[in-house]
Amino acid sequence: MAKITKEVNEHFREFVGDWNSKFYFLVGGYGSSKSYHIALKIILKCIKEKRKVLVIREVYETIRESCFSLFEELAEELHLTDDNHGQPVMRFIQSPMKIRFKNGSQIIFKGMDKPAKLKSINGVTIIWIEEASELKYSGYKELLGRARHPSLSIHFILSENPVDKSNWTYKQFFKDEDKGRFILDDEELYKKRIIRTKDTYYHHSTVDDNHFLPASYIEQLDEINSYDPDLYRIARLGHFGINGTKVLPQFEVAKSHLDVVAKVAGIPDKFKFNGMDFGFETSYNALVRMAVDDEKKILYIYWEYYKNHMTDDKTAKELADLGMDQVQIIADAAEPKAITFYQQSGFRMRKCRKWAGSRLENTRKVKRFHKIVCSPECRNCIKELKNLTYAVDKNGELIYDEFNIDPHTFSAIWYGLDNYTVADVKKVPRNSRKGGEAAA
């Protein structure tokens, strides 16, 4: 086939064509174009040689809008889906997600939340683990045994935004002080940007390495330092660190309830939300009313209901007396019987969406708000959210979808915001310029 030409960011030029290492560890800030160049690297390899590639994320449902769509976009830019004498170079299969190449190469996509689906996979020679820090270490070890071939070289590509130094990826590829194990100083990587050891190619990048982004996106990242310095370290600088374990560092209590009510009064009704979590014995019926300043990305919490040892009929009566049967409420999908009862009692209530990994995604959604301002009258929201921290596993690593308590108000917030999308600063315009050379 004709030579493929594609302009790439200079900092990634060597990486795209390099296959001399077994492990490739790419770490950096948001918008640095790590994933873009990994996808390009894999496409070029699959065109040159007949390869079987496995692309992994912790949660399968997150792959379609990330890795899979990125391959689709690149294939279109490179005209690899065009009809080429009756057969395109790349053919995309939507369910289950898979890419087939004209020469027999294939890329398959799996999630670690469905480990049984990995058992039937064989002949894999390249594994790309996207958002590697989200995987459990046990999952990583499982993948190490999945790549094998009698003649072809084996490669593992890991990409991530850095998190805290307790994460297994830092301990595996840099240093594990508990075990006295030292591989590489991360500060040295930030200075040199690219380092090759015996079997690993290290690559560090930031948004400054991506020359195809608008200045407004970089300004967005710079603004993060004003409301979440820890996220700034990750997103803008691409550095590991001692992570603040607070889940919501941007949470603050307003000086007065009237201040919050005044702000909420100026927000359109379409940005006002109500979420409810159900409970009885040790859990609580938690109903939280919220409003979002969509332009400034501020979440206001201005009203709560929080009780347990209450049957549905008693709770429904109390809430109806408060006028809550007149507003749209989005509630926990795990309680269809309770939702049906409230609907039959005249409430405008529906269930939220839930899927494997939704706890993690909903937590991230709330963390994207620049500020979370809570009325001082919402005492249970303050009690549960102000000092909410991540749970820690037996190895001292943070668990990003588990917490030190069961925060019912946090769950209610997730459900209430079911229809609202907080702009993800990680989502950036793709590199779409053509030119330069990346030969296949």
Image (cartoon, grey):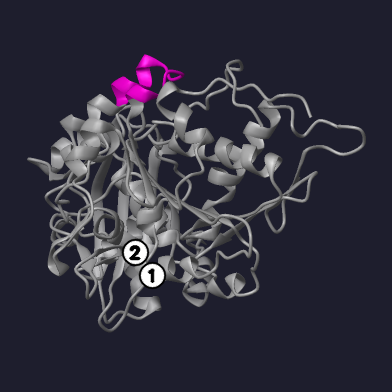
Say which residue appears at 52% left-offset and 66% top-offset: 343
| Quadrant in which residue 5 is drawn | top right
164 sits left or right of 79 in the view: left
Figure quadrant of the N terminus: top right
Give the vertical position of 422 relative to 314 (above or below).
Answer: above
Q: What stretch is highlighted in magenta?
A: 208-220
Q: In the rendered structure, does residue 375 fall within the stretch colored magenta?
A: no
Q: Residue tagged by mark 1?
A: 316
In percent of the image, x 34 and y 60: which residue is there? 412
Considering only vertical position in the picture, is 52 above or below 80? below
Residue at the spot 46% in from the left edge and 19% down from the top edge? 212
* Percent of width and height locating residue 147: 55, 64
* Rendering coords of residue 215 (x, y %): 36, 15
Residue 355, percent from left and from top: 51, 63
In terms of secondary structure, where does tag 2 sit? helix
Q: Is the magenta stretch mostly helix, strand or loop?
A: helix
The kind of secondary structure element at disc 1 is helix
- Residue 238: give x, y in percent of width and height: 27, 37
Say which quadrant the C terminus sits in.
top right
Asked where in the image residue 246 lies, by quadrant, the reply is bottom left
As rendered, which of 438 and 166 lies closer to the eye? Answer: 438
Q: Would you name the residue on which mark 2 appears?
A: 319
Whether residue 346 is visible here, answered yes or no, is: yes
Q: Would residue 239 be found to the left or right of residue 423 on screen?
A: left
Q: Are marks 2 and 1 in contact (CB under 8 Å)?
A: yes
351 vs 253: above or below? below
Label 1 amino acid?
Ala
Queried whether the magenta region covers residue 213, the answer comes back as: yes
Q: Nearer the viewer, residue 435 or 134?
A: 435
> Distance from label 2 to label 1 (Cα)?
5 Å
- Please indicate whether residue 359 sits to the left or right of residue 166 in the image: right
